[in-house]
Image: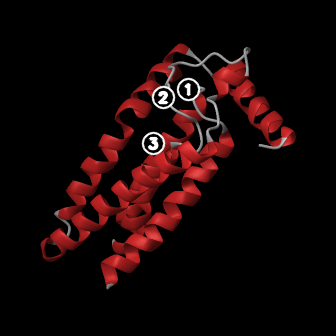
Amino acid sequence: MPATVSQVDASILLFIQNHLRTPLLNEIFRFIANYGLLIVCVYAAVMLLWDRRKIFPFASACVVSGFLGKYASDYIKHLIKRPRPFRENADLISLTRPKSFSCPSGHTTVAFAVAFIMWRILPKKYSVPALCMAALIAFSRIYMGVHNPTDILVGILVAYIVSLVTDFLYKH
């Protein structure tokens, strides 16, 4: 990553650490980081009840999008091999310490891949909560100090591309 991008990432992470973190928010974002993907999946399952005629196509689209997002993010992580921000910046205190590479955020990619496919298939009023939860998951990864903001942006971009591929497969 260019030095200026890394400097901006570090500045944002340190600002959040020094000005936004509180014991209560730490617990809230730890919960979102640990269970947010499950919440998105449960929400998608509840949305299946929305129109029973579309259960299988909708469920399969969500599963395919999620798995493609996971596979793509893992593959790209091994290509980029960007270290976690707490490994590059001694001033950053991470609330958890994953061992894998940082870019893109796998949590963000999977959450947005499912949310974007919901956005494409369901009426917007049903898909907006999934997008909001995906955004909370993405922010939780920055808040926890395990991803740089650019890792999140790359994850969202990968998720968008995955949702396009899934939508194409879903319609054909």
Contact? badges 2 and 1 (CB < 8 Å): yes
Would you name the residue on which mark 2 appears?
29
Q: Secondary structure at mark 1?
A: loop
In the image, 143 versus 74, the foreground residue is 74
Residue holding disc 1: 144
In three-dimensional space, the C-alpha distance between marks 2 and 1, rounded to whole angstroms, equals: 7 Å
Amino acid on which disc 3 is placed: His
Please report whichever mark, 3 or 2, sits nearer to the chain's N-terminal start.
2
**What is the x, y in percent for residue 95?**
53, 18
Q: Which quadrant holds residue 84?
A: top right
Other residues around mark 2 within 10 Å, as few (<14) / some (14–19) / many (≥20): many
Q: What's the mark number on residue 107?
A: 3
Q: Position of residue 125 (x, y in %)?
A: 39, 66
- Where's residue 163, x and y in %? 44, 67
Asked if residue 74 is positioned above or below residue 157 in the image, the reply reads above
State which mark lies toward you, 1 or 3: 3
